[in-house]
Amino acid sequence: MKVTIDDVAKMAGVSKTTVSRILNGNYSQATEETKEKVLKIIRDLNYRPNPMARGLKQMRTNIIGIVLSNLSNPFWSRVLEGVEDTCRQSGYSLMVCNSNEDSEREAGLIDGLQMRQVDGIIVNPTVNNKELYTEIVQKKYPFLVINRRISDLDVDDVVVDNIQGARLAVEHFIERGRRKLVCFVYEPEGISTWQERIQGFKKAMSENGLVVTEQSVIQVDNASGRAKAAIIDYFRQKPDVDAVFSTNNMMTLEILEGFKELGVEVPGQVALIGYDETVWAKHLNPPLTTIEQPAYEMGRIAAKNLIQRIDSKTARKPKHVVLKPSLIVRQSSGDHQ
Amino acid sequence: MKVTIDDVAKMAGVSKTTVSRILNGNYSQATEETKEKVLKIIRDLNYRPNPMARGLKQMRTNIIGIVLSNLSNPFWSRVLEGVEDTCRQSGYSLMVCNSNEDSEREAGLIDGLQMRQVDGIIVNPTVNNKELYTEIVQKKYPFLVINRRISDLDVDDVVVDNIQGARLAVEHFIERGRRKLVCFVYEPEGISTWQERIQGFKKAMSENGLVVTEQSVIQVDNASGRAKAAIIDYFRQKPDVDAVFSTNNMMTLEILEGFKELGVEVPGQVALIGYDETVWAKHLNPPLTTIEQPAYEMGRIAAKNLIQRIDSKTARKPKHVVLKPSLIVRQSSGDHQ
DNA sequence: TTGAAAGCGCTAACAG
DNA sequence: CTGTTAGCGCTTTCAA
């Protein structure tokens, strides 16, 4: 049934060594004649080398594994597209796992991927498995972290400049004459993404002469409905706020829902900027000003750099890539003064 | 460095056969004593069987491959979540590919997956590779088709009842007093999903005493911006239409954009129902009435049934699953009469 | 320029 | 109840 290298060898009247060599492009040391002959038989028989046998021998699988924390956020879909494209073009297959932001599950998944001997692993880390990440890096397993940094760990990573993202929002608000800003964010819990957005927000506020208080940054549980409740709560207490910076696209939808329930007008009463550009942002009511992250690019570069590390046999220093976000201005952030 | 079954055997003073048996749960024929001993050593050495060696021997990989046609549509992200959950829980890894609706690429991907010896393949088919699908089914390779049917091919599939989906929309429009309906759809090109939505739309129209004309169903190119242009065009010619059924979630966003440009009021002037529920639907202006498809469920069942087929050594008839869509009523479809 | 042979790590007859 | 042996399909020294 299945055609093996032996079948080809027999049929061509050569040894499997020769077939193997030709298969792997070792043309240099082969007669044009035998080469053509073998190649033809391979075609005729539609012979495909068995990757497991090959892998067993070479100790490599040509598979890259990725552990994402949230498959349903369109930001990650886009990243995944970038990773998939690059892997496919480079001859790698992609194994996808979903940690769902659960660090135990993440550990299991990373473990499983290693056991499977995938050639490299990309992960959007929950950051609660530092020992594991460290161990992997130490044993020189090709490993790349995406979107979030691991503090005190020198590892390949690709992130977006979240401080800059927050600054873009703050400065835009100020340009539009807003002064009472508030930032909504999920519990940072050691996650660099959230921390940096908070940090950037505060820094940009200070630099522009606005005072930062306890009430400038509101942290909410990352669970459905919590952001909506929080914004309603906040508004009842501080009805004079005039600009909200939402640091996550799902959160933004909830905030909008809250505003509707409150009867608050956007941007008349309060301006709104959301993190992450999405297909729907421009169709919201009002069209949403957003901070766009180069998600596809992030995926592409992550895959590219990981593959480079896999290919480079010699040890090399981890590569750190920081991508720049940009501002997409629409109506939700108000008009020019 | 890497610890193999030989190391364990040596260390435990038994043969690798014994280790292998214990590893695979063949406890029945083993002394409690040796079993404990071997198990302990396995733990101590942190021994992990090499899946490639195992796969080479057993001719199976414990990998399932999936070929999607559009990673960035949230509908598919949700399906993927269902597939991933089920695979993980059943001990399979998931290999994800993106055909991007390109049938040549699809053929290459399916081919690659087979070559990789994945244990089964799920695909949202472009439907332009019938010979390939047929060949795969004939050679009894575990294969399951999702979302779209392949005509004249008896293969495992999981789809949603698109006729019913369209009917839900039409009947809802009629209840709300609308009579001049139009359906927007991408070029069907043999894709059952689109065909059935058109068919269901026409059928429900007729059954409710509405006449179906050439202008009742508008087909547009599946390229960015085409739907927006089409709706604007249509409206200028037939300004008396009072209900639009959009058969795709991206298309819906464009239609809304078109309406805005036209200054058409929804639902005042025209009612709108969109296919596929999304996170953003309820936040649109106005909140969108949608046809919801059980995407996660679809992924779950697809994976489950594929695994059943993989496990069942005996030939069995293909299983056809048809899931039911449901209507989520919001403001875009108008008020009760 | 080509081939023989050893083996990657594991499982499964078949013996004992 | 356990071990010996023979591969799974491929790559890779080492020899010719």
Image (tube, coloured by chain):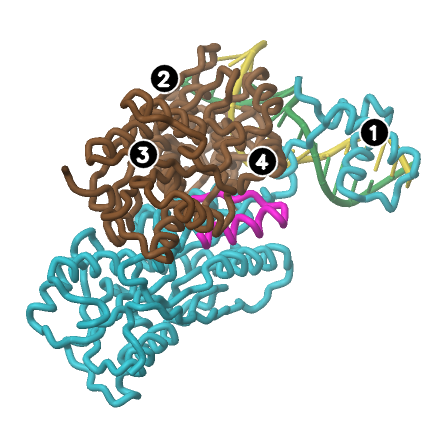
Chain colours: A brown, B cyan, C green, D yellow
Q: Which numbered marker is on residue A60?
A: none
Q: Which numbered marker is on residue B40?
A: 1
Amino acid carrying label 3: it is Gln
CB atoms at circles 2 and 1 under 8 Å apart?
no
**Which tag is nearer the camera, tag 2 or tag 1?**
1
Give the residue pinned by disc 4.
A106
Amino acid carrying label 2: it is Ser
Amino acid carrying label 4: it is Glu
Discs 2, 3: same chain = yes
Give the residue pinned by disc 3.
A293
Quadrant hosting residue A285? bottom left
Residue drawn 36% across the image and 75% down it: B163
Discs 4, 2: same chain = yes
Discs 2, 1: same chain = no
Q: Which residues are magenta?
A: B78-96
Can residue B52 be seen from the camera position used here? no
Question: What subunit carries mark 1?
Answer: B
In the image: residue A186, left or right of residue B223: right
Image quarter (top left, top right, bottom left or bottom right) of the C terminus of chain B: bottom left
Q: Under tag 3, what secondary structure?
A: loop
> Crowding at label 1, few (<14), some or many (≥20) Cα neighbours within 10 Å?
some
